[in-house]
Amino acid sequence: MNDGGVRAGERVLDLFAGARLTPTQRRIAHCLVEHAGKVAYLSAAEVADLAGVSQPSVTRFAIALGYEGYPALRRVLRELTDGSDGERGREHNAMQGAIAAEADNLGRLCQQLERLEDVRRGAGLLVASRPLTVLGLRSAAPLAGYFGYFASKVHPDVRVLDTGGTSLLDRLDQARAAGADAMLALVLPRYPRESLEAVREARSMGYAVVAITDSAVSPVAEHADVVLPAAVGTRLVFDLHTGPMAMAMVVLQAMCDADPEPVQRRLERFEATATRRQIFQA
């Protein structure tokens, strides 16, 4: 997909932000994003053939998004994909364009956060879990560690699972036996199989799963109780994770807001300990 196709796909992806989609509907959504440049001019039957689903599934998908049918959705798709970004593209070099696209991602995330119901629901599940389990493998491992570092200042028992292997499920078992009933799963492209398997296993153990991922049609969405999408940057050789990192810190703030008095006591104890041990440069 060229730069114009990527931008069109990003605009189409916004249609699905916060939507609860079935696996078949996620398949259709993925098709619309991947083929954003042409699907706005295809019939429902042609989209169904492209996505490998039935024509009624395409109609039900449009209705699930709040449209009367696929023709109404197609009109919106045309509005989203007909716009030209050529002038903007000429203003920036490739590196500036990547950062500008990331700023656009953050702008969409800001708009998404006008509704905080899912964030607050996820935060409530996480702050009440003792211990709190945080999963992030491969590219998501640094983000899991980042979240875990700060979460440990306000939560008494945070367990970061940032390495895979045969012991991963053992550690999930151990946390569950210790009382954990919620897990934050950070699952980013290219969606490691091991992460998805761990999330499925966690659900079977009785965990509630709060997922931070790149879109509402991510493979992990099917297995999560709460999905918090935040787009990743795709203009450079390797993805930029500014959006997911911001979302992780938003979730942590919501956790603090959900249980303020114990959080404040823990923060005060940490500051007193840090001062006594001279941890930070004055």
Image (cartoon, rainbow, N blue to C red):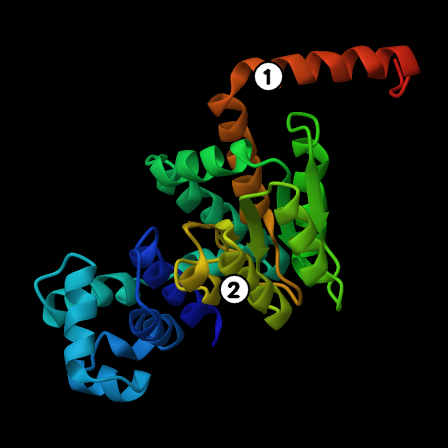
Query: In this rendering, would 206 be left or right of 146?
Result: left
Query: In this rendering, would 87 be left or right of 200?
Result: left
- Amino acid on which the number 1 mark rests in the picture: Pro
Q: Quadrant of residue 270?
A: top right
Please name the residue shown 21% across and 68% down the image.
61
Relative to the observer, which residue lies in front, 133 or 94?
Answer: 133
Q: Position of residue 282 (x, y in %)?
A: 88, 13
- Amino acid on which the number 2 mark rests in the picture: Arg
Query: In this rendering, would 253 be left or right of 174?
Result: left
Q: Assess disc 1: are there few (<14), some (14-19) or many (≥20) residues with their C-alpha within 10 Å of its C-alpha.
A: few
Q: Position of residue 95 (x, y in %)?
A: 63, 57
Relative to the observer, which residue lies in front, 196 or 92?
Answer: 196
Of helix, strand and loop, which one carries label 2?
Answer: helix
Q: CA separation, marks 2 and 1?
A: 32 Å
Mark 1, residue position: 262
Q: Position of residue 155 (x, y in %)?
A: 64, 29
Whether residue 199 is visible, yes or no, is yes
Mark 2, residue position: 200
Query: In this rendering, would 268 be left or right of 69?
Result: right
Q: Assess disc 2: are there few (<14), some (14-19) or many (≥20) residues with their C-alpha within 10 Å of its C-alpha.
A: some
Q: Quadrant of residue 156?
A: top right
The disc at residue 16 is none
Total tally of numbered discs in the picture: 2
Please name the residue shown 69% across and 50% down the image.
174
